[in-house]
Image (cartoon, rainbow, N blue to C red):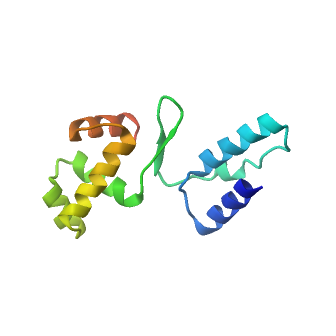
Amino acid sequence: TLLRQCRTVQQAAGGYLPSPAFVDSLLAAIQDAEGAQPVDQRASERPARQTSSDEADGLPISLSARELEVLALIAAGKSNQEIAAQLYLALNTVKRHAYNIYSKLDVTKRTQAIAKARRLGLVP
């Protein structure tokens, strides 16, 4: 019941973290486990902003809108200093975003992050 309420509130607010598809997958798993009533699938039919992608193991990789901006600039070959100047952020903030991105993508280097993000369709 709480997940259904969360999805309804999330739809009304236009939020997509966690993604509606992820919430629906949790609800479907609960339904399968408990034999509950069918889950309303309309939320997963709506197009969502690209803030997450599924990894091979099926777990979602959710990046914030700002992390996606930083990731796109990293993929464009910008340095942390250039990203900070372009986005009007402190250098340490950019470094923290990069650290979070690497952690979420399970990589340790810029080149690995770019390759994985391209493979997942997070950046062109």
Instruction: Decide: is 52 above or below 92.
Output: above
**Could you tell me which quadrant the N terminus lies in?**
bottom right
Residue 124 visible to the viewer: no
**Could you tell me which quadrant the C terminus lies in?**
top left
Left or right of 19: which side holds 7? Answer: right
Residue 72 visible to the viewer: yes
**Residue 77 x %, y %:** 17, 47
Instruction: Decide: is 20 above or below 107.
Output: below
| Front-most of residues 4 and 47 | 4
- The part of the image, by quadrant, that contains residue 123 is top left
Left or right of 120: which side holds 39? Answer: right
| Front-most of residues 14 and 67 | 67
Residue for point 82% across, 38% down? 34
Residue for point 40% across, 59% down? 65
Left or right of 68: which side holds 16? Answer: right
Left or right of 121: which side holds 79? Answer: left
